Image: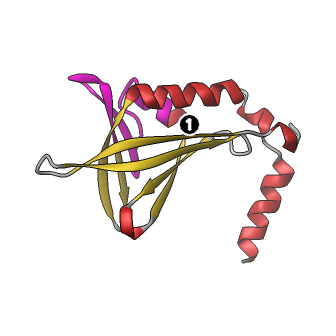
Amino acid sequence: MTSQNHKTIRSNVVFDLTAPAGVRSPVWVELRYESREPYAVNMSFHAGMTGQIDWVIARDLLADGLIVASGEGDVQIIPQPDNHELVIIALSSPSGQAAFEAHAAELADFLDETYDVVAPGDEHKWMSIDEELSRLLQNDLH
């Protein structure tokens, strides 16, 4: 695909950060999908005064997690068995862990928009191996 065909999909949603004592705090999250990186979904968590925390997850993981518990390690997405309208997004890093409740319908709507741009199974058609290698080599040299 040529660069003028590339598109970006953005959606602003609110996830509820869940604490062990059942306390919930709303967190604004920007979901972003770029056809240049057709396998990935970027999540930017706006953490108030501390700034922004970015996570990149596989688009397939997000889609699978709406239906069945998915992911291992750093990212897990788990549908709520007693409330099909919600999923848990659990994130883990060396600096800590966090669990968020998200509305499944909002995530499904976002995914549908991404599928309108790049159909599932067509991701490879949107990648340029030369561009990716060039970008990787640039990052290795810095």
Q: Is residue 61 above or below residue 140?
A: above
Percent across and percent down for residue 95 are: 35, 68
The image's colouring method is secondary structure
Question: Where's the N terminus, which quadrant?
Answer: top right
Q: Is residue 124 left or right of residue 11?
A: right
Question: Where's the C terminus, which quadrant?
Answer: bottom right
Q: Residue at x 44, y 54 (%)?
A: 45
- Of 137 and 27, nearer the camera is 27
Which amino acid does the dot numbered 1 rest on?
Arg
Q: Mark 1: give few (<14), some (14-19) or many (20+) Cα within 10 Å.
A: some
Q: Quadrant of residue 40?
A: top right
Percent across and percent down for residue 125 are: 80, 33
Q: Quadrant of residue 135?
A: bottom right
Q: Residue at x 35, y 50 (%)?
A: 27
| Number of numbered markers | 1
Q: Residue at x 44, y 48 (%)?
A: 29
Residue at the extreme bottom: 142
Residue at the extreme right: 2
Does the magenta portion include 71?
yes
The residue labelled by disc 1 is 59
Q: Is residue 84 above or below residue 43?
A: above
Residue 74 at least partly seen: yes
Which region is colored magenta? 62-89
Q: Secondary structure at mark 1?
A: helix
Q: Residue at x 55, y 29 (%)?
A: 111
Residue 119 at least partly seen: no
Percent across and percent down for residue 109 are: 51, 26
Q: Quadrant of residue 136?
A: bottom right
Does the magenta portion include 70?
yes
